[in-house]
Amino acid sequence: MKLAVVCANGKAGLRIVEEAVSRGLDVTAVVREENRSAARAVIQKDLFDLTAADLAGFDAVVDAFGAWTPETLPLHSRSLAHLCDILSGTPTCLLVVGGAGSLYVNPEHTACVADGPDFPDAFKPLAAAMAQALAELRQRADVRWTYLSPAADFQPGGARTGSYTLGGEELTRNAKGESVISYADYAIAMVDEAVSGNHIQQRISAVSA
């Protein structure tokens, strides 16, 4: 299959490209600067300059965009809307590297991780921006999207165990009662989903087993 990873030079993007390449997939890195990922094919272009022609022919596109500063947080919504617009009406799947703050913590789906008393204040603006982008994504019936949230403890330097549990809209814990996943294991879940396409127009989540 043909897979494009947008923002492939980021922490999540690098891991996802590495995982996809290791499986023999035809992977293209979409980057603004020199490609640092394991992909050999490259589209060197800003996300907001991408066109429908740039992404034509891909079976799936992974959106690994991230913004962290107060002035750039609105770009979560803008970037996702742009990718949706250029993939609208196509058979290409759009898979989004999401956040954990919007995962529900009750069966009624009235409270989220970010609402909890232990959620750090410093991360609340980021969680709110990503939750807003997800809410807008849910309205896009014209796009074959899947939103993959990580566990609450998303570890860049965590080990690749090769095992994970797939969850849904609610925060999922492993047998030890932990909600944790490494970037490497998250990449496995993302590439599995890109290949299978089992959760179109759904938000799912992943936790290390």
Image (cartoon, rainbow, N blue to C red):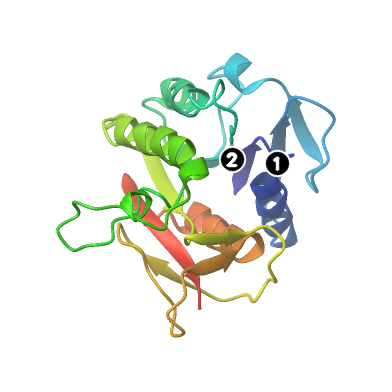
Q: Residue at x 53, y 19 (%)?
A: 52
Q: Label 2 crowding class (10 Å Cα cut-off): few <14, some 14-19, many 20+?
A: many
Q: Are marks 1 and 2 in contact (CB under 8 Å)?
A: yes
Quarter of image, res 47 = top right
Q: Position of residue 76 (x, y in %)?
A: 49, 29
Which residue is label 2 attached to? 64
Mark linked to residue 10:
1
Identity of the amino acid at label 1? Gly
Q: Please, what is the three-letter code of the amino acid marked with disc 2? A: Ala
Q: Nearer the viewer, residue 112 or 148?
A: 112
Mark sitting on residue 181 = none
Question: Which of the two residues, 9 or 153, is positioned nearer the viewer here?
Answer: 153
For image coordinates 67% across by 55% down, the residue present is 20
Q: Position of residue 130 (x, y in %)?
A: 43, 37
- Mark 2 or mark 1, which is nearer the start of the sequence? 1
Q: Residue at x 70, y 47 (%)?
A: 11
Query: On the picture, is 190 further left or further right than 10?
Result: left
Is 51 placed left or right of 198 in the picture? right
